[in-house]
Amino acid sequence: MEQQKLKTWAESAPRLINTAAGRTPADLVIKSGRWVNVHTCEILADHDIAIVEGRIAYVGPDASHCIGEDTEIIEAEGRYMIPGLCDGHMHIESGMLTPAEFARAVIPHGTTTMFTDPHEIANVLGLEGVRMMHDEAMMQPVNIFTQMPSCAPSAPGLETTGYEITPEDVTEAMSWPGIIGLGEMMNFPGVINADPKMLAEMAATQAAGKTIGGHYASPDLGPNFHAYAAGGPADDHEGTCEADAIMRVRQGMRSMMRLGSAWYDVETQITAVTERGLDPRNFILCTDDCHSGTLVNDGHMNRVVRHAIDCGCDPVVALQMATINTATHFGLERELGSITPGRRADVILTSDLKTLPIEHVIAGGVTIAKDGEGLADCPHLNWPDHARQTVHLGKTRVAEDFHIKAPEGANAVTANVIGVVENQAPTKALKAELAVEDGLVQMDVEKDVCQIALVERHQALGTTVNGFVSGFGYEGRMAMASTVAHDSHHMIVVGTSHEDMALAANRLGDVGGGVTVFKDGKEIALVELPIAGLMSDEPAKTVSAKAQNMVDAMEACGCTLNNAYMQHSLLALVVIPEIRISDLGLVDVTKFEMTDVIEAVQ
């Protein structure tokens, strides 16, 4: 089922014209507001907006000629009238929510358009999973456009996914009504080396006249970056510094600057605009990954815009980066992203452009939120049973499955360790001297070196890959397990106790996926994520409360990192340097090759 969709501009043109001319009354008129024009970067006081059939017919100083007996009137009372906010790159699954519940969570924050890449579910359920995300997205009262995932697996040969996305899948998806382009091209070595599969996916997207999403997660801005840009990606959100942003826009790409729950990459890049004076129309704001707690407590794109303003960006320019710039990038400038004739009537009323309180949200000419309260129906897809039964462990895990055996005769070893970096996606490749007892390599909790394991969950192989991780600060006996493990989404278990690690892994097998924390042999937090082991169809506030319990439980185990759960969930992301874990072993992402956990023996 789908909610009633807007007529096209062409279909509505007769009424739009007649309303603008004063011959036919508008459905809705917003009176006496300050029109924020993102096309001209102007703020125009005492303007009205006339809306008919969900589209804007007239914007001008006096819409009285558009008002009839049945016209709804909203008094702006001098408030700013800004376009509905657009998120240029995001993953709904990162909120632990379905598209319906994600929409319900962000509507009160003024997000009326999202460009989503469901590559998380693609790794678990393949093209069918993408279709289900697409179909539920199309049912919502706001605009949710889907990018067809490009890389499952994200790094062929270095990980195993539940399903593989093929060029044929991409070609098929390009015909679906809500597909706006190709999701982030994470396999940047494949593009750089002209891999036929990656080129075929991009060619299918270009043939459909749609946008190729980028993901160049390397600090190398030399020939490799130029080769990547030459392949076709049109944007990139992996920049972390001013030089990254400048290089992308100089090469004709859009620089997407993200502020997610754990990624703080706006402040270090927006200086390209605020200090270097580059044309801001080639810069886009996005979230990438936001968990439910951020959505409930802090906001969504309104949070990103506020942050950009706090970083010195002019408020109207920041709004351009979250509205018209995004729409233009995806070829939708004539459809949304501004308050101008013919466009979808997605409008926010706010009393202050800097702090951006979201006081009234209109989408498609209908009020969907007021003063922080969502008023719209967000329909759910009927997710099939097999989408809720995706955790296949193959066997019950025991403590011995998490033992790391030392080479014979070793008294100590030098181990390669994954080093977590707070608030950033990249990790550090660290070394640690670890003791050997009874033939097993020991963790060193006092030096913040605990154990990480990847538990295979797609094919019931019963395999476990072990390694070491540093940066969480865990203490005592504990373990944390999650079936959200970008991008292959096996199960990641981090802990200081092999027994607790086994308990945590088995618990997620029992509940069908999610996140759990064990301390001293007892479960102290659980977030059930039954859909693909990634999402809950409960409301965001419910999921957020459970997620907050999970955060509190991590703190009770000694972890003080900001948004440490997001760091946990990325430890298997084998396309972002420097070192990660996969179902095949430890991966050196600077070289895109496997490496040993134990480097040397003492």
Image: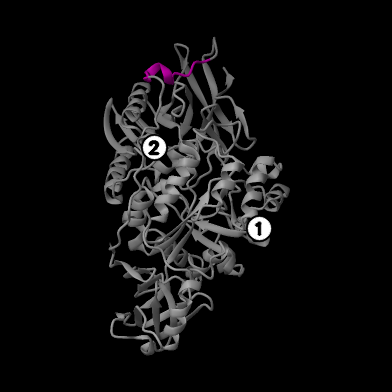
Q: Position of residue 366 (x, y in %)?
A: 34, 69
Q: Are marks 2 and 1 in contact (CB under 8 Å)?
A: no
Q: Position of residue 320 (x, y in %)?
A: 50, 69
Disc number for residue 505: none
Horizontal relation, residue 193 to residue 585: left or right: right
Disc number for residue 247: 1
- The residue labelled by disc 2 is 387
Within 10 Å of the Cα at label 1, are there few (<14), some (14-19), or many (20+) other Cα atoms?
some
Closer to us: 260 or 106? 106
**Can you see residue 262?**
no
Q: Position of residue 163 (x, y in %)?
A: 51, 34
Q: Magenta segment range?
A: 396-406
- For residue 113, what is the image quadrant? bottom left
Q: Does the segment drawn in magenta span residue 399?
A: yes
Q: Quick check: 596 above or below 134?
A: above
Horizontal relation, residue 156 to residue 132: left or right: right
For image coordinates 50% across by 74% down, the residue present is 38
Q: Quick check: 111 above or below 16?
A: above
Q: Secondary structure at mark 2?
A: helix
Mark 2 or 1 closer to N-term? 1
Q: Position of residue 506 (x, y in %)?
A: 34, 25
For image coordinates 39% across by 46% down, the residue present is 563
Q: Does the segment drawn in magenta span residue 87?
A: no
Can you say which quadrant of the picture contains the C terminus? top right
Mark 2 → mark 1, Cα distance in angstroms: 41 Å
Closer to us: 566 or 29? 29
Name the residue type under label 2: Ala
